[in-house]
Amino acid sequence: MPLSHLDLRGVSPAEFADRLPAPAPGEGFPTAEVAAIVEEVRVGGDRALAELTVRLDGVRPPALRVGKDELAGALAAIPELLRDSLELAFARISAFHAHLSTTSGVGAGDEPFVSGGVTVAQLVRPVDRAGMYAPGGRARYPSTVLMCAAPARVAGVEELVLCVPPGSDGRVDDASLAAAAIAGVEEVYCVGGAQAIAAMTYGTETIPPVDVIVGPGNRYVAEAKRQVSGVVGVPSAFTGPSEVVVVADDGTPPEWAAVDLAVQAEHGPDGMAWLVTWSPATLEAVQRELDGIVSASPRRADLESTLRSGGVAVLVDGPAEALAVANVVAPEHLELLVDGAEALLPLVRRAGAVFLGVYSPASVGDYVAGPNHVLPTARTARFASALGVDDFRTTVHAVAVERDALARLAPAITAIAEVEGLAAHADSVRRRVEG
């Protein structure tokens, strides 16, 4: 499956944005179909969920909610190595987010702001219920369960809700259920797609509504989250189909670059796998390796579908231009598979996560590196970041003003209030000062 080729040698980086392929806003997104599903669940509740699951997934689960015995049984049923690996990943992800929450950003231990008799403290509070979506059906993603649950637990969320699409047998797979058990998630529902997002937003007879919804999914899931944002909290990132930009040169092992393109492409349709290089020989070698990987893959159909619509090889003049391409694309994963990758890091402006050097494949970040693999896609890395603790928290500013400070600030307050025509605003300060 050849990549589409784009030669940008001799082109100014200022022109890259106009030259690089990009989807039109909303193109390809099933807006009307998702809106119909969301409305069907909002009105019909559990009955609608059951009908949609039969219609869209082709199975009827025995129950929406997975029982505690089944959770425990799944944890006992999986191989010991898998369980140990999931536990290790959960511990590492939790430790990473705990470190972030106590050393940076807004945290409960932040010193208050004090200035001229005015003290402003930040109260950090977790949401009550967090909804998590882990893809299923076509594949299983226990790692996504951990990636969503770990920062939520570190944030202090007490009630975690997980929705996973049913497999062909009408059940949630044991690996995902075991990951839920490890993370202490007791509310698991066998429902997927846009209907799961609608259920967690509006609630049904079985599924109480949540405060935020996180987790990746296909374009239907992503579009549903877009539509319900504002009714529930949805992180600003569009966590849709998987993406990677691999930057390679003459020193990059072609088979490693090729397999890393396949890593993201095998997630299925609508994804993106780009190779960016300043070496024509590397481009040709990677293409040959990729062709062999695709032809031998058990997920050949998914690879071919993704590469047909989203596989691109870009030839540029050098490293600076390669990073300029990456910044326009703002990919979910950016792999710098070149010597001295760290030296290129200052040029990175837009990416979900960056992997430095040939021994740092994105697969490490997918499982045990610590940072989250729920990352912004569809160029939302321009303004959004990886899922983290703060996506499960709110901050409240607590303001305390001393009497003398209010007197000093009163003229400014009343002047602004009066020019805005808000007499009561000014009077609330004036009465205190004059009294």
Image (tube, rainbow, N blue to C red):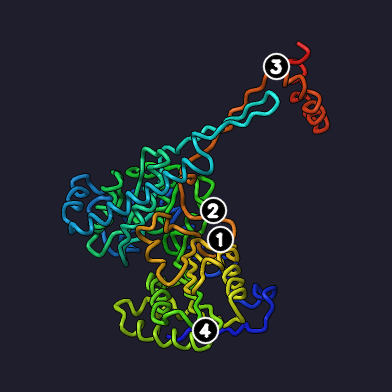
Tell us which disc is closer to us: 2 or 3.
3
**CA separation, marks 2 and 3?**
41 Å
Q: How far apart are marks 1 and 2 (CA)?
A: 8 Å
Would you say the residues marked 4 and 2 are in contact, meaning their CB atoms lie under 8 Å apart?
no
**Separation of marks 1 and 4 at Cα, in angstroms:** 23 Å
Label 3 neighbour load within 10 Å: few <14, some 14-19, many 20+: few
Position above or below: 370 against 29? above
For numbered disc 3, what is the local secondary structure?
Answer: helix
Amino acid identity at mark 1: Thr
Q: Position of 408 compared to 27: left or right? A: right
* Residue hosting label 3: 403
Image spot of residue 388 (x, y percent): 46, 49
Badge 2 marks a residue whose secondary structure is loop
Q: Name the residue under label 4.
A: 4
Q: Which residue is nearer to you in this view: 337 or 130?
A: 337
Dot 1 or dot 2, earlier in sequence: 2
For marks 1 and 4, the one nearer the N-term is 4
**In this picture, residue 147 sits left or right of residue 379:** left
Q: Is mark 4 on a helix, strand or loop?
A: strand
Q: Do the residues labelled 1 and 2 touch (CB within 8 Å)?
A: yes
Q: What element carries label 1?
A: helix
In the rendering, at what x and y percent does residue 239 appear? Answer: 47, 59
User: Which residue is label 1 attached to?
Assistant: 380
Mark closest to the chain's N terminus, 1 or 3: 1
Amino acid type assigned to the residue bearing label 2 in the image: Ser
As measured in the structure, the alpha-carbon distance from the residue carrying label 4 to the one carrying label 3 is 69 Å
Under mark 4, the amino acid is Ser
